[in-house]
């Protein structure tokens, strides 16, 4: 099974313009994500897919591979699908460019979920405390016992009526089989997706199954400069410890 890891990196972020090049521990954030993708044992090739030559130049200067994709791509999945049309593989992993603490082991776990031929989309979750689940900036997933995702939400799901529930944070990573990636990239936005601003709900509404595995460790999604500071704090703490 040939696996290509793609790091989508868009320059014109609304809340944080130039985010992929924001300095983190002395290097552009996107390079930390690419390092993790390259270190994953089950990845045969890792690259950055970007709409901006500035990002591509920094990646290449650091010895990485970068592919320029359309500025019209509406999501990271669309950017990965564009790469898939040029570079053949069996599985593509979307390692989102704003997850600088994504562990290589997490990437391997996402790929491993597709070892079964009847599975076509996989992702990961990590257990979190009820207080963290209340944050709409943290996407939660509710999954069946066999690992099928039932729903993703910015709300705290499931609702706890005092019986005690296990909350799971959804991490920003997807593994897709090539044929399924092409199909979901052609889907139109769906009502639930637009309500929650979560593209994976489009796939669930269209009838696709997303398999959820447990991450080996948490990650930090960087949407704002404050998130970047938190990622830096965690990174420094890990280095010291």
Image (spheres, rainbow, N blue to C red):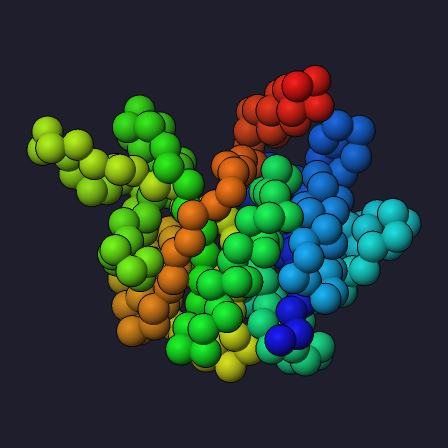
Residue at 59 percent across and 56 percent down: it is: 108
**Res 72 visible:** no
Where residue 41 sits in the image (x, y, percent)? 68, 57
Where residue 90 sits in the image (x, y, percent)? 60, 77
**Res 38 visible:** yes
Residue at 65 percent across and 62 percent down: it is: 42
Where residue 184 sits in the image (x, y, percent)? 44, 73
Would you say 2 lies left or right of 153 here? right
Quadrant hosting residue 80: bottom right
Residue at 87 percent across and 47 percent down: it is: 62
Quadrant hosting residue 82: bottom right
Residue at 52 percent across and 62 percent down: it is: 112
So how many labels did they put on this image?
0
Would you say 104 lies left or right of 159 here? right
Image vertical order of residue 15 relative to residue 190, above or below: above
Where residue 191 sits in the image (x, y, percent)? 27, 62
Image quarter where the N terminus lies is: bottom right
Image quarter where the C terminus lies is: top right
Image vertical order of residue 95 relative to residue 118, above or below: above
């Amino acid at each position: 099974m040939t696996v290509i890891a793609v790091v989508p990196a868009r320059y014109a972020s609304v809340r944080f313009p130039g985010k992929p090049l924001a300095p983190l521990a002395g290097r552009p954030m996107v390079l930390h994500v690419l390092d993790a993708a390259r270190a994953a044992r089950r990845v045969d090739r890792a690259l950055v897919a970007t709409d901006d030559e500035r990002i591509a130049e920094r990646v290449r200067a650091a010895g990485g591979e970068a592919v320029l994709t359309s500025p019209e791509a509406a999501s990271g999945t669309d950017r990965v699908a564009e790469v898939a049309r040029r570079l053949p593989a069996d599985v593509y992993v979307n390692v989102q460019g704003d997850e600088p603490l994504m562990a290589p082991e997490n990437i391997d776990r996402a790929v491993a979920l597709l070892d079964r031929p009847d599975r076509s989309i996989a992702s990961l979750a990590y257990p979190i405390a009820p207080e963290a689940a209340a944050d709409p900036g943290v996407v939660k997933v509710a999954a069946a016992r066999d690992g099928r995702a039932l729903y993703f939400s910015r709300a705290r799901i499931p609702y706890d009526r005092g019986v005690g529930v296990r909350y799971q944070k959804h991490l920003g990573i997807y593994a897709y089989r090539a044929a399924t990636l092409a199909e979901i990239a052609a889907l139109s936005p769906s009502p639930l997706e637009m309500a929650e601003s979560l593209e994976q709900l489009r796939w669930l509404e269209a009838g696709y199954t997303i398999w959820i595995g447990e991450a080996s460790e948490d990650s930090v999604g960087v949407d704002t400069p404050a998130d970047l500071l938190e990622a830096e704090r965690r990174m420094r703490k890990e280095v010291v410890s």
